[in-house]
Amino acid sequence: MRSPLPFACLLLFSFISQAQFWQEYATGFPTASTGISRFDIVDENVAWGIGYNGINPSNNIQQFSKTEDGGFTWTDGSFTLGNVGLGIADISALDAQVAFVAAYPRSSNQQGGVWKTENGGSSWNKLTSTQFTATNSFPNTLHFYDNGAGVVAGDPIADGWEIYLTSDSGATFTRISQANIPAAQSGETGYLAQMESIDNSLWFTTSKGRIYHSINRGASWSVYQSPISDFGGTEVSGDISFSDASKGILQTNEGLIYTTINAGATWTRIIISGGANPYGDNIAYAPGTSSIISVGSNPDFAGSSYSTDDGVSWTNIDTIQHVDVAFFDAATGFSGGFTTSSDSGGVYKYSSNVLSSGNFAFAKAISIYPNPAQDLVTISGTTRVLKLELLNLSGQVIKVFEPARSVSLQGIASGMYFLKIGSDLGIETLPLLKK
């Protein structure tokens, strides 16, 4: 995620839909206008968030907030790293007690690295086995798994990308071989907290608009060029999220939307239908679904919205500043706001059922293959297909098929489409690439 914009103002009103979609709770941060810039959701109950100064983000703070009851109550705490000047880059938690945090230097006399807590954030110990000792060397982002595996990624140094793996919860780290990751371009860097994870798949984004992708928890990487030139620049920026190991979404700071069905190797722009819109900051899939939530913190383009059809159409929720957004599933998600006092505001908890109003058991079960396809496409996961429509990226129906479990794409031009499948269980819309 990109560095958050200053907190210019909090709108004191919202649409009725905001009350239905989000419920605001107190983060516990003691200072007004403290925001949450990064969430890590462990499960339906536990989530951690990184605090930041919403009035002036250059004023560094080392604070976190944590919930253990699904977001109804939050408790604030401090990252005690031994140097109050270090910036907090990213967080990855295993449960309510164990978490890892990446920190970066904000002046020349500081040294970043990775710290770990095993007591719910009461104390933090530096993991010295990650190097990050070169000049201007520090971790941008990290992700840990519950079996002790983890990956920590920094910027390129003299001999290539600085990425470390651990298999023992950080007791030891090994830097990956540069033979296992494509070389950085001249001047290319990563960004703080810009890493996505789905099962064994990882993605991180760069200042050259590229996306690095691993399917084996960071052991080896591929790289793809995205439709944008930079994921964190002052003029151009973007954010990505994935529903599964293949299907993803990319949002630009102008609110443009692109979709992929091959893990980010190629992207196709979606021409949004209807009058609602996504916003220009952070975006999140509810994993395993077609539902996407978009938020914006720029006072000139602030708000939140959602889509239940992989980004083709959107419903606006509010025009309030939202910072980060993250979802664990179609029932559990959060967005960052700003405190008005220590016991009021700061985090939005998803409190609706609009993302799961369809039959998601059906949605997860159904699939189409092959995809990409040249001619015949087969539908699996249901025995009764009642309706089949092929939609373009604007959501317009361009062909209605006779209901069947196999359809022919003969006569359909090559490109990206959506196949809308109706059965007695519900309706699901899946992206389809015609070769």
Image (cartoon, rainbow, N blue to C red):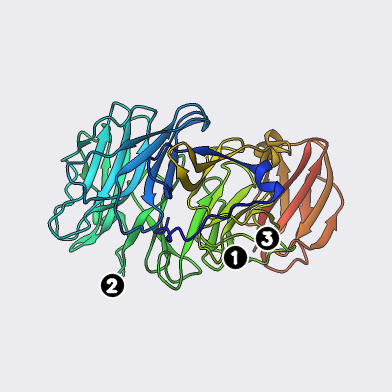
Which amino acid is tagged 3?
Gln
Name the residue located 54 percent from the left edge and 45 percent from the top edge.
244
Q: Mark 3 points at which residue?
A: 374
Q: Tag 2, which secondary structure?
A: loop
Q: Name the residue under label 1.
A: 268
Which amino acid is tagged 1?
Thr
Quadrant of the rendered image containing residue 391? bottom right
Residue 114: % across, % down: 24, 43
Quadrant of the rendered image containing residue 359? top right
| Left or right of residue 81, residue 411 in this image | right
Name the residue located 47 percent from the left edge and 61 percent from the top edge.
8
Residue 145: % across, % down: 37, 35
Of residue 24 and residue 97, the one placed in the foreground of this image is: 24
Q: Name the residue under label 2.
A: 186
| Left or right of residue 47, residue 186 in this image | left
Of residue 202 and residue 337, the one placed in the foreground of this image is: 337
Q: How crowded is mark 2: few (under 14 residues within 10 Å), some or many (20 or more)?
A: few
Name the residue located 28 percent from the left edge and 71 percent from the top edge.
187
Q: Tag 1, which secondary structure?
A: strand
Name the residue located 16 percent from the left edge and 48 percent from the top edge.
131
Disc 2/disc 3 C-alpha distance (Å): 38 Å
Disc 3/disc 1 C-alpha distance (Å): 18 Å
Vertical position of residue 70 compared to residue 350: above or below = above
Quadrant of the rendered image containing residue 137? bottom left
In the picture, the disc for residue 10 is none
Residue 120: % across, % down: 33, 28
Vertical position of residue 420 compared to residue 327: above or below = below
Q: Tag 3, which secondary structure?
A: loop
